[in-house]
Amino acid sequence: MASLSSLSTVPITTTSLSGRTRSPLFSKTSSHRFKVSCNASSADENPNLILPNTSLNMQNVDRRNLLLGLGGLYGAANLTNIGSASAYPITAPDDISDCVDANSGINDPDRAFRGLKCCPPASATGPIDYVLPEFSQLRIRPAAQRLTPEYVEKYKAAIAIMRALPEDNPHSWKQQGKIHCAYCNGAYNQEMNGHPELQLQIHNGSLFYPFHRWYLYFYERILGKLIDDPTFALPYWNWDNPTGMMLPSVFEDPGPNGNPRTNPVFDPFRDVKHLPPTIIDLQFRGQESGLNCVDQISANLSTMYGQMVTSATSTDAFFGTNPDPVNGTPGTIESGAHTSVHIWTGSSRMPNHEDMGNFYSAGYDPVFYSHHANVDRMWKIWKDLKPNSNQDPTDDDWLNASYVFYDENKQLVRVYNKDCVDHNKLGYDYEPSRIPWIQSRPIPRVKASNIVAQSLGVVKKVEEIEFPVKLDQIVKVLVKRPATKRDENAKKIANEMLFLNGIKFNGEEFFKFDVLVDDVDDGIETTAASSEFAGTFAQVPHNHEHEMFMTSGAAFGITELLEDIEAEEDEYVLVTLVPRAGTEDATISEIKIQLVPIA
């Protein structure tokens, strides 16, 4: 982190680390790494990508017995639930005519290239509850890097028909793009059980996954109806696999006469620096990483492991918390890889980074739906990784949260979270694609660094900090742990988690900072390939209540991290917050570590 160390609010005295074992930034020989070819177009063409069979059904123990057996180990004061209950179900309005022009997340509404009139066409009647049809066969969503010519022709034909529909048709390309703008940029308000009127926002909390699942479901069904093929399924952008870590070529193919603008799935508002064969950066900061192809792929795989395994150790950590338009907390993928892909794809030359780089315009790029198909796939994969503990939210308010869409028959319908938790019941599944990131557990840069002992008396303890603290420069603080020397049984009943609460930031700008634990300030930048990298918090521009500043929080699992860096016996850990983008006026109100029971 030497490149930013001069910004540290509380500088640490540098101490020699001679005699310590240091792992390379990217190991090419570690047993959990694998060889890659940056020229390979599919796993079949590169046998080095074929991994040994790895069961996703990792066994879990019966925690009820453990709780009884370890009764006195954890008192109530030491355990906490993140608390995702909202105290009321989120409900989209019955009367969609109450929709208003959106303007949140736009620095200057006059520069909103796509326009802020995001409301759907009027309906003669209110929404009816949607009844899922019986599906005789599953629609299989293919990986975008492996599309057949026949599929590409069918996909482009469906989008071409959608684009040709009159704008006021609820199935039109423009109306489909408006859905994201309406739900994400302040077009809907609602009265919720005695609470003041609040703006409906499906990002920055646990509504993120189910809303987008329903959104893609109807989009996919509409496309299938337009080409009279009920088996049609959207392609997913397989950005978590090395063979899919670039913008899928189908979206940039030349159309008739060699002109890409005649390709129905082409969008001129993408970053030209990031067209194929550029490898995507799943930790994108708004500027290029400078890594070569192989190292970028390795960093991406470590990023995926961190956001799907290390940090996503609970339902609330993965999904996000509080379906609340003010205090919602995003999940690990939402604030991580999801945001990076949005910002990396959107055009840096456009006033609001249209299309993908701003929520109000993202739905106008066909790649948005393939991006979110892979995000949705992460939901499926996360549950498969640990079926006994990685589970959907069970809170009644979350289950009864609802949204309104026009279905494939142009009927206005209401759908509920509870009806979408099993994607097979929605009639689709995903073409299998290997997840090599499961073998990309980050490597500690320095084991047993003794950095906490070196920091005592130099870096302030969290109880000595006057909050809120500004994030316009690096922040270092020592945070007390609730327990030390936890044995394996203790780890099976509770996760150790780092919480950052009261994160206040400008919602009209791309915002990002990284979180490091026990990082050594030795002139080497710490990346997601290192165990000391706890995670990241990033947001695509959007806002609430037409106010510039938003408030959120973040949670990161650190049990595995502390094992890897051999810091489990330490009473304190050194937490470092590294600003990356849009942090000039940002602040944070609380930093703490707590034990969270495993569901």
Image (spheres, helix red, strand yellow):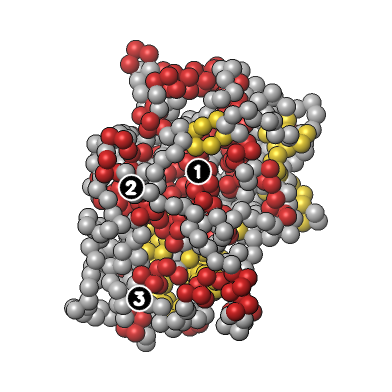
Residue 575: horizontal and vertical position, in percent? 41, 72
User: Residue 3 is drawn in which quadrant?
Assistant: bottom left
The residue that disc 2 covers is 51
Tell me which amino acid carries mark 2. Answer: Leu
At 50% from the left edge and 33% from the top edge, which residue is drawn?
Answer: 141
Mark sitting earlier along the chain (3/1): 1
Could you say which is closer to the camera, residue 462 or residue 411? 411
At 45% from the left edge and 43% from the top edge, which residue is drawn?
Answer: 342
User: Residue 94 is drawn in which quadrant?
Assistant: top right
Tell me which amino acid carries mark 1. Answer: Arg
Taking 534 as reference, is 43 left or right? left
Other-residue count near label 1 (Cα within 10 Å), few / some / many at <14 / 14–19 / ≥20 = some
What quarter of the picture does the C terminus occupy? bottom right
Viewer can see residue 360: yes
Name the mark on residue 63. Answer: none
Tell me which amino acid carries mark 3. Answer: Glu
Residue 588: horizontal and vertical position, in percent? 51, 67
At 30% from the left edge and 51% from the top edge, which residue is drawn?
Answer: 298
The residue that disc 1 covers is 377
Outermost residue to the bottom: 457
Could you say which is closer to the camera, residue 112 or residue 511? 511
Mark sitting earlier along the chain (2/3): 2
At 49% from the left edge and 48% from the top edge, which residue is drawn?
Answer: 381
The residue that disc 3 covers is 566
Viewer can see residue 328: no
Q: Distance between the residues labelled 3 and 1?
A: 33 Å
Residue 227: horizontal and vertical position, in percent? 56, 17
User: What secondary structure is marked by label 3?
Assistant: loop
Above-or-below relation of 147 to 100: above
Outermost residue to the top: 257
User: What secondary structure is marked by label 2?
Assistant: loop
User: Residue 402 is drawn in which quadrant?
Assistant: top right
